Amino acid sequence: MKIRILIKDLFLKSKTEEIIKSLNHSITFEEDDFDYVIVDLNHKDAFNLIERYPDKCFCFCSHVDKDKIDKAKEIGCKNVYPRSLFFSKLPYLIKTKVH
């Protein structure tokens, strides 16, 4: 399974890469060749990507950014979480949703 990462923060990006690799999935940097994508809603391209691939996105942002969480859900993303929960849930999400 190829998973793309759309995260600017180097610490969070590194943490995400570690989780993906620990679950034996590969990371891709290709813009259109991926099975799923991890999206930081603070990334400048986040909502464009969600609009194109709402069913392939796992999204997160700060719990205080309720407007961004709501917007991602309105666009059609069903996997949107506050950052405080996201990284603890990510292994489970990948195991159960990524086939």
Image (cartoon, rainbow, N blue to C red):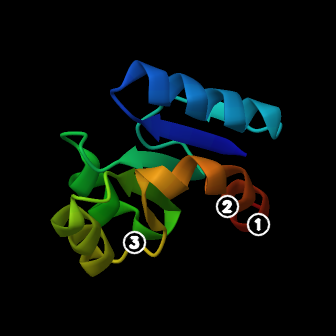
> Looking at the picture, does residue 2 appear above or below residue 22?
below
- The quarter holding residue 76 reads bottom left
Q: Which mark is residue 93?
A: 2
Element type at marker 3? Answer: loop
Q: Which badge, 1 or 3, is on the more N-terminal residue?
A: 3
Amino acid type at circle 1 is: Thr
Judge left or right: residue 30 versus residue 2: left
Disc on res. 45: none
Question: Does residue 98 appear left or right of residue 67 in this picture?
Answer: right
How many marks do you count on the picture?
3
Of tags 3 and 2, the one toward the viewer is 2
Give how far apart the Cα atoms at labels 2 and 1 are: 5 Å
Q: Read off the residue under disc 3.
A: 77
Which disc is residue 96 wearing? 1
Query: Which three-letter amino acid code belongs to the residue tagged 3?
Result: Cys
Q: Are marks 2 and 1 in contact (CB under 8 Å)?
A: yes
User: Residue 65 placed where, x, y %?
Assistant: 21, 58
Q: Position of residue 93 (x, y in %)?
A: 67, 61
